[in-house]
Image (cartoon, rainbow, N blue to C red):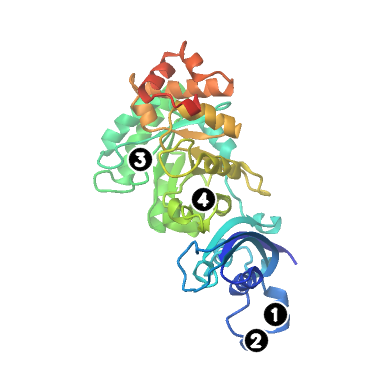
Amino acid sequence: MTRFSATYWIETPDSLEKAAQTLAAEQSSGTFVAVPGETDELKQRHAARVEKIEPLDVITTPSIPAPTTATLFRQARVTVSWPLENIGTNLPALVSTVQGNLYEIRAFTGLRLLSLDLPAEFTNHFRGPKFGIEGTRERAGVNGRPLIGTIIKPSVGLTPTQTAKMVEVLADAGIDFIKDDELMANPPHSPFEQRVKSIMAVLNRHADKTGKRVLYAFNLTAELDAMKQNCETILAHGGTCAMVSINAVGLAATKAICDRGGLIVHGHRNGWGMLTRAPALGMEFAAYQALWRLAGIDQLHVNGIANKFWESDDSVVASIAACRAPMHNLAPLLPVVSSGQTGLQAPETFRRTQTTDLLYLAGGGIAAHPSGARAGVIALRQAWEAAVNGVPLDEFARTHIELREQIEKFGKPEKYA
C-alpha cells in the first residue's frame, strides 16, 4: 500500500516513543479512548505509523509554555507515515493530516513540521507550476541572468494614472518585472480594473515599440469569485502575470486560480513569519513550498541575503534550494529574492546559491539610485554580471558608473564585497 510521510521536530515531557505514538494516533484512526468500530483490522489498514525516532537534546525548560510539572523535556526528529488512501489526492486533506491538531496536543512543548515525502502517485495528480522558471524566463525574454524586478511604492494612495506613469518610467529603464505591493488590492482610489487597464496600456505600447514585454503582477487577492473575475480582467487587457497573497486566500483558492491557467502566478508569502519565526513551532520552508508547488504557483518569495527582516542568510539559501529541488513531475518554483536588496548582495547571493534562476526584487535599491530608476536597473545587472564572473564589485565599479554610484549611495557591506 502506498504511503506518504512527514518529518517533525518535537519536544515533549513524555518519553519520545509515547509522544510519537500520540502524534500518529491523533492524526489517523486513534482517539484518547477506544471506541466501537476501531477494530484491529481498521487500525492495521489506516493508522499512521511511526517510522523513525532520532533523539536530539534534553533541556530543563519547555520551549513553549505548557501545563506540566515536568523538569526534563526531550527533543527528537520523528518521521510518521500514513496510507495514501486516507487522503486520496486532496490537498487540504493532506494539510489536515500532517498538521491538524498537532500543535495543540498537551504532550508537546514544541512541534515543527520539517519536510514532506510525497509519492509520485500523489504528486502526479497535480499539474504544479505551469510556468515556473522556464516559462517566466520565456515570457520575459530574459536568459543567463536573474530577472530584475521592483515593487510599486508608495504601496497605497496612488491613482491608476499615477501608477501607470511610474510603470512607464520603470519600463523605459529596462525593468523585467513589476508588481503591486501586497497592500494594494481594489481600493477606492485605485480600482482594480482601472489600474489594470491603465498599466497594460503603457506596457502594451512599450512592447510594441521595443519588443520587450515587461511582466506586471497585479494583486488579484480577494474573495474567490472576485479573484476569478480579476483573472479575466488581466487577460482581457493583455496581462501575463498575477500576484496572490497565498496565506490570506488559502490553498484551495490559490489552486483554483492556478488551474485557470493563462497567467504566471506570483506567490506572495506575507504572513509567513507567523508560521515559522518561533523555532519550536510552525513549519520549515521546505514543507511550505511543497504545498504551494502542488497548488500550482510559479514564483514564491524567499526573502534575501542580508535582508531587512529577521531571517538568517542560511535560511534564505535553504529556501532557494527548496524551490529548485526536484519534486517528481512538478516543475521547480522561481525563487523571489526580496527585502532590502541592492546590487551589493548579488555576489554573496550567487556565491551561496550558484544560480541565476532568481527573480531579484529591489524597491529602493532601484528607485533611490542617485541617477534615477534606469541607472538603478543597470546597476543591478552590473552587480550580477560581476558576481557571476567572480569580479569584486569595487573593481567592476571602476568602469561601470551606475554600480559605482549605487555603492556610494548605499555603502558597501564588507561581508558582501
Q: Which residue is mark 3?
A: 196
Q: Please determine whether, in this image, residue 47 is positioned above or below residue 152.
A: below
Q: Residue at x 54, y 62 (%)?
A: 111
Residue type highlighted by circle 1: Leu
Q: Please determine whether, in this image, residue 292 is positioned above or below residue 404.
A: below
Q: CA distance from mark 3 to mark 2?
A: 57 Å
- Dots 3 and 2: beta carbons under 8 Å? no
Residue 239: x and y, percent? 43, 38
Pointer 2: residues within 10 angstroms few (<14), some, or many (20+)?
Answer: few
Residue type highlighted by circle 4: Cys
Residue 157: x and y, percent? 25, 41
Residue type highlighted by circle 3: Val
Q: Residue furthest bottom?
A: 36
- Dots 1 and 3: beta carbons under 8 Å? no
Q: Which residue is mark 4?
A: 258
Q: Which residue is mark 2?
A: 37
- Dots 2 and 1: beta carbons under 8 Å? yes
Q: CA distance from mark 2 to mark 1?
A: 8 Å
Going from the N terminus, do you reach mark 3 or mark 2 first? 2
Give the quadrant of the N terminus: bottom right
- Dots 4 and 3: beta carbons under 8 Å? no
Q: Residue furthest top?
A: 399
Residue type highlighted by circle 2: Gly
Q: CA distance from mark 2 to mark 4?
A: 40 Å
